Image (cartoon, rainbow, N blue to C red):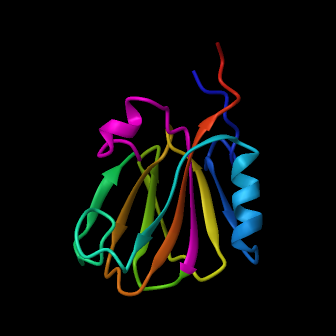
């Protein structure tokens, strides 16, 4: 059982704005151990994170990345917007949906065990820095 506290029980995520990517990365490291840091977005011509303008259904990170998820728990996800686009990131928690369009310099950190997320709309030129963290605050 994870004892992660991000945001509130009603919304287990934290919105970040007016923060540099360096500061965002340092904030992410406070939650635990980095599993993977990657760019997702406009430069990919194939694969899930690509510029393909297809919806990405609700999921948890690790659902499609079995090789990573089999070795590490992806407890916390951070998405930081390096270049904005029109794509909408939608969070689902307790049956409610919360859409977010990230602008450059904004980010969101969420509990990957409590929140589902999806992408809707055109990826366009959007590029996100994605950080997967294994929590250091787990109940033994």
- What residue is at 43 percent from the left and 29 percent from the top? 71
- What residue is at 36 percent from the left and 79 percent from the top? 43
Residue 58 lies, in percent from the top left, at 33, 53
Give the quadrant of residue 136.
top right
Q: Residue furthest top?
A: 140
Residue 82 lies, in percent from the top left, at 57, 78
Q: Is residue 38 above or below residue 45?
A: above
Q: Is residue 28 above or below residue 127?
A: above
Q: Quadrant of the C terminus?
A: top right
The one of 41 and 120 positioned closer to us in this rendering: 41
Q: Is residue 106 above or below residue 10?
A: below
Q: Is residue 73 magenta?
A: yes
Give the quadrant of residue 44.
bottom left
Give the left or right position of residue 41, taking residue 132 as reference. Answer: left
Residue 9 lies, in percent from the top left, at 65, 41
Q: Quadrant of the N terminus?
A: top right
The one of 53 and 68 positioned closer to us in this rendering: 68
Q: Is residue 86 magenta?
A: no
- What residue is at 41 percent from the left and 47 percent from the top? 61
Give the left or right position of residue 139, taking residue 111 as reference. Answer: right
The one of 24 and 43 positioned closer to us in this rendering: 43
Q: Is residue 31 above or below residue 122?
A: above
- What residue is at 76 percent from the left and 73 percent from the top? 19
Q: How many marks?
A: 0
Which span of residues is magenta-colored? 61-82
């Amino acid at each position: 059982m994870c004892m992660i506290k991000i945001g509130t029980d009603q919304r287990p995520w934290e919105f970040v704005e007016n923060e540099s990517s360096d500061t965002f990365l340092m904030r992410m490291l406070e939650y635990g151990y980095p599993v993977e840091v990657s760019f997702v977005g406009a430069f990919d011509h194939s694969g899930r994170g690509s510029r393909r303008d297809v919806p990405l259904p609700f999921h948890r990170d690790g659902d499609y990345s079995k090789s990573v998820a089999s070795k590490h728990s992806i407890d916390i996800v951070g998405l930081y917007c390096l270049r904005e686009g029109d794509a909408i990131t939608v969070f689902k928690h307790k049956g409610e949906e919360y859409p977010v369009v990230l602008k450059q310099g904004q980010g969101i950190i969420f509990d990957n065990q409590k929140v589902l997320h999806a992408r809707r709309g055109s990826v366009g030129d959007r590029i996100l820095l994605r950080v997967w963290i294994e929590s250091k605050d787990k109940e033994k």
